[in-house]
């Protein structure tokens, strides 16, 4: 049975360390339309943080990462909080419909939202019940897999749709949506540099592997057992496989044993 080398184990641990931290994407948006307590023609900004090691949910729906987002906010140009949730899903789609579109969605539907965050419109107060980011690329070139992106998707690719929706509701009046056009989406979490200790371990493992290979390459450079002398013992007490191979090999005519000493 082959065991993974120390170098591979250290490299794997290094990759896991780099990917294990939460990642934050920041975005800006402009409201489409106007009215109510969320004015149009203003720049809004927000961010969401998700677990980079979130696992794809089992089932037939590919690219669904349930509960990956742990914090998501939207604020107005003065910093006032407009929407927030601590639980949202991410969906990554590669050629998910007959048109071959790629999608990237973030949705808090079914999650708990801050009840103090209300939208004042039509003389009524509407409570926040969902937040949605919807990106769609009709050309199908945004993604080549269902993997969770650790870098922010480029908005320039999603020409079909790039919006943020806020859903508000009232028990009697149903719901209403406020829609924003996304104008930027970037990763603000720095890509981490390998720590000095981790780098040293990886380099030491690689050096160890090279030394081990050197030992193995030189392990068959010993002399042929001399006639009349016992074969060297193997690892478990018997004659070694190397010695037996020498004894089983006939000598060429005209050559004596000492001339074959390596």
Image (cartoon, rainbow, N blue to C red):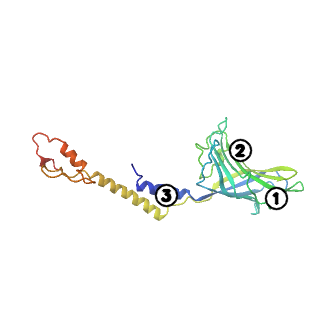
Residue 61: x and y in percent read: 65, 43
Horizontally, residue 63 falls left or right of residue 77, namely: left
* Residue at image mark 2: 161
**Residue that appears at 28% across and 54% down:** 236
Horizontally, residue 215 falls left or right of residue 165, namely: left
Q: Is label 1 in contact with label 3 (beta carbons under 8 Å)?
A: no
**Marks 2 and 1, Cα distance to the nearest angstrom?**
26 Å
Q: With respect to residue 145, does 25 lie above or below?
A: below
Front residue of 91 and 162: 91
Residue 110: x and y in percent read: 74, 52
Residue 23: x and y in percent read: 61, 57
Q: Which residue ends up furthest to the bottom in the rendered image?
A: 197
Q: With respect to residue 61, does 219 lie above or below?
A: below
Question: How many residues crowd mark 2 within 10 Å: few (<14), some (14–19), many (20+)?
Answer: some
Q: Which mark is residue 90?
A: none
Question: How many residues crowd mark 1 within 10 Å: few (<14), some (14–19), many (20+)?
Answer: some
**Marks 2 and 3, Cα distance to the nearest angstrom?**
37 Å
What secondary structure is found at the residue carrying circle 1?
strand
**Residue that appears at 22% across and 45% down:** 245
Sequence-wise, the earlier of marks 1 and 3 is 3
Q: Is label 2 in contact with label 1 (beta carbons under 8 Å)?
A: no
Sequence-wise, the earlier of marks 2 and 3 is 3
What secondary structure is found at the residue carrying circle 3?
helix
> Looking at the image, is mark 2 or mark 1 nearer the viewer?
1
* Residue at image mark 1: 118
**Marks 1 and 3, Cα distance to the nearest angstrom?**
45 Å
What secondary structure is found at the residue carrying circle 2?
strand
Q: Which residue ends up furthest to the front in the rendered image?
A: 237
**Residue that appears at 11% across and 43% down:** 255
* Residue at image mark 3: 14
> Looking at the image, is mark 2 or mark 3 nearer the viewer?
3
Question: How many residues crowd mark 3 within 10 Å: few (<14), some (14–19), many (20+)?
Answer: some
């Amino acid at each position: 049975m082959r065991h993974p080398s120390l170098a591979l184990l250290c490299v794997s641990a290094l990759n896991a360390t780099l990917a294990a931290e939460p990642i934050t994407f920041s975005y800006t948006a402009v409201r489409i339309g106007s009215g109510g307590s969320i004015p149009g023609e203003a720049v809004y900004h927000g961010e969401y943080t998700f677990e980079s090691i979130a696992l794809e949910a089992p089932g037939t729906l590919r690219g669904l990462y349930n509960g990956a987002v742990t914090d998501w906010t939207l604020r107005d140009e003065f910093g006032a909080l407009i929407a927030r949730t601590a639980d949202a899903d991410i969906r990554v789609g590669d050629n998910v419909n007959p048109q071959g579109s790629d999608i990237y969605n973030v949705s808090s539907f079914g999650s708990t939202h801050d009840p103090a965050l209300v939208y004042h419109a039509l003389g009524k107060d509407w409570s926040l019940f969902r937040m949605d980011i919807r990106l769609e690329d009709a050309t199908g070139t945004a993604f080549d897999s269902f993997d969770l992106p650790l870098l922010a998707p480029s908005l320039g690719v999603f020409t079909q749709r790039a919006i943020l929706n806020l859903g508000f509701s009232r028990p009697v009046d149903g719901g209403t949506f406020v829609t924003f056009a996304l104008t930027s989406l970037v990763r603000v979490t720095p890509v981490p540099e390998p720590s000095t200790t981790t780098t040293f371990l990886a380099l030491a493992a690689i050096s160890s592997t090279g030394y081990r290979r050197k030992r193995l390459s030189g392990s068959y450079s010993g002399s042929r057992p001399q006639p009349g002398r016992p074969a060297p013992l193997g690892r478990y007490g018997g004659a070694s496989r190397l010695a037996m191979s020498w004894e089983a090999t006939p000598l060429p005519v005209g050559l004596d044993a000492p001339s074959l000493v390596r």
